[in-house]
Image (cartoon, rainbow, N blue to C red):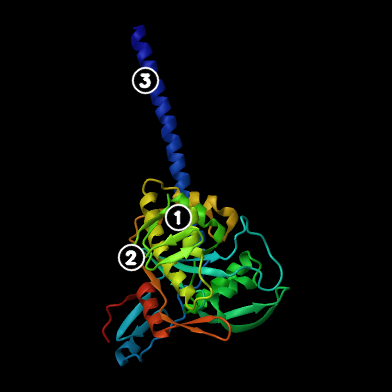
């Protein structure tokens, strides 16, 4: 009788322990799900504008004109396209600063140049991740401000300069975000992250390093990269691979952007693979480089993004570069995008064809 009671007591204790564990798990899952919901709602609340400002390249037929035409529809090459407003777009900026901690700056153009500019695009309709690399020398409208932060003028100049006319913090990021958005027909951008180049080593090593195969020979400091030879980059090698360029050589920024494309393709693939066994990877990297970064994406929002896009497809053809021509201006190199090619790429990434016959 005593043994039976003792066994029953042990059973009850085990049940109580399991109930406590289960309760904590449910609470944790509830908090996680709540975090995702909050992240999603605040993420989309930042972008009231639902569509870019694009125009049809062709005249509508009588049948099409008689249709209930939506504001975010455009006609191009005989097809009608609808903007995918479920897409999430983020601007990643690599700032030409080696500071270990970002801080406000004062004076004209001291905010730092955005030497690397990438738009990361998550499409929930076809479960894909796409990246657009923007040449730092892309000529576009940028806003000039004096040393006191007063607006002076808008001029045509290299897009990399726009970040410098802010405070090195949120104002710089908002200026750069607006310049990129305007370049892409006032595209809604859901968030940004401006990261000092000093963070490259930490980001690279957080995913265990990255394998790259350079397209051309390249030397940087103590590192020599050979075309066609795959190499595993640790943090310092990644820094050399991504940042250095020979400014005495024409087109060196284009060459560096090409290397950044190679690296980003391999890096994102590495992140996707590691995230399967390390679900908190994105948040871990976020926390590691937080002092070297300015971002308007919260941890809640990042949690929503990471869990939502973890299974999205990304491959070698998922990273796009603007087509165009680099010329030597009065002092510096200037990149002029091919406007027709940019428009077609934009429709391909951000729009969907409608099955409408005119």
Task: Classify 10 Å Cα crowding around label 1: few (below 14), some (14-19), many (20 and above).
Answer: many
Q: CA distance from mark 1 to mark 2?
A: 25 Å
| 349 relative to 298, above or below | below
List the residue tagged with mark 3: 11
Residue 24 lies, in percent from the top left, at: 46, 36
Q: Pick the quarter of the image with the C terminus.
A: bottom left
Q: Which mark is residue 316?
A: 2
Q: Secondary structure at mark 3?
A: helix
For the point 41% across and 62% down, the residue is 225
For the point 58% across and 83% down, the residue is 331
* Figure quadrant of residue 105: bottom right
Residue 148 lies, in percent from the top left, at: 73, 73
Give the label, 1 or 2, closer to the camera: 2
Q: Nearer the viewer, residue 204 or 246?
A: 246
Q: Secondary structure at mark 1?
A: helix
Q: Nearer the viewer, residue 315 or 51?
A: 315
For the point 61% across and 55% down, the residue is 100
Q: Is residue 338 left or right of residue 172?
A: left
Q: Which mark is residue 100?
A: none
Q: Nearer the viewer, residue 268 or 234?
A: 234
| 13 relative to 179, above or below | above
Q: CA distance from mark 2 to mark 3?
A: 56 Å
For the point 33% across and 68% down, the residue is 317
Task: Classify 10 Å Cα crowding around label 3: few (below 14), some (14-19), many (20 and above).
Answer: few
Q: Which mark is residue 304?
A: 1
Mark closest to the chain's N terminus, 1 or 2 = 1
Q: Pick the quarter of the image with the N terminus.
A: top left
- Asked whether disc 1 touches disc 2, contact meaning CB atoms under 8 Å apart, the reply is no
């Amino acid at each position: 009788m005593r043994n039976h009671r003792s066994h029953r007591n042990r059973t009850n204790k085990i049940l109580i322990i399991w109930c406590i564990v289960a309760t904590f798990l449910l609470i944790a899952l509830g908090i996680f799900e709540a975090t995702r919901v909050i992240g999603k709602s605040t993420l989309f609340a930042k972008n009231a504008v639902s569509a870019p400002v694009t125009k049809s390249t062709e005249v509508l037929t009588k049948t099409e004109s008689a249709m209930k035409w939506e504001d975010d529809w455009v006609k191009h090459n005989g097809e009608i396209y609808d903007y995918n407003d479920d897409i999430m777009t983020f601007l990643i900026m690599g700032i030409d600063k080696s500071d270990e901690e970002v801080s406000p700056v004062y004076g004209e153009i001291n905010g730092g140049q955005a030497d690397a500019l990438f738009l990361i695009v998550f499409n929930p309709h076809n479960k894909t991740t796409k990246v657009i690399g923007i040449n730092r020398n892309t000529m576009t409208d940028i806003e000039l401000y004096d040393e006191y932060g007063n607006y002076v003028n808008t001029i045509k100049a290299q897009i990399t300069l726009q970040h410098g006319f802010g405070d090195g913090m949120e104002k710089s990021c908002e200026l750069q975000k607006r310049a990129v958005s305007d370049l892409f027909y006032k595209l809604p951008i859901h968030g940004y992250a401006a990261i000092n180049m000093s963070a490259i080593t930490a980001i690279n090593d957080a995913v265990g390093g990255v394998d790259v195969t350079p397209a051309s020979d390249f030397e940087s400091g103590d590192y020599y990269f050979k075309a066609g030879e795959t190499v595993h980059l640790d943090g310092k090698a990644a820094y050399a691979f991504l940042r250095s360029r020979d400014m005495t050589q024409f087109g060196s920024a284009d060459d560096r952007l090409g290397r950044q494309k190679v690296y980003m393709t391999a890096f994102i693939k590495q992140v996707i693979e590691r995230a399967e066994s390390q679900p908190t990877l994105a948040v871990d990297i976020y926390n590691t480089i937080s002092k070297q970064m300015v971002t308007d994406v919260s941890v809640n929002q990042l949690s929503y993004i990471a869990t939502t896009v973890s299974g999205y497809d990304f491959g070698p053809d998922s990273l796009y570069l603007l087509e165009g021509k680099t010329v030597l201006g009065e002092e510096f190199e200037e990149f002029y995008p091919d406007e027709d090619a940019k428009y077609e790429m934009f429709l391909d990434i951000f729009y969907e064809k409608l099955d409408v016959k005119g």
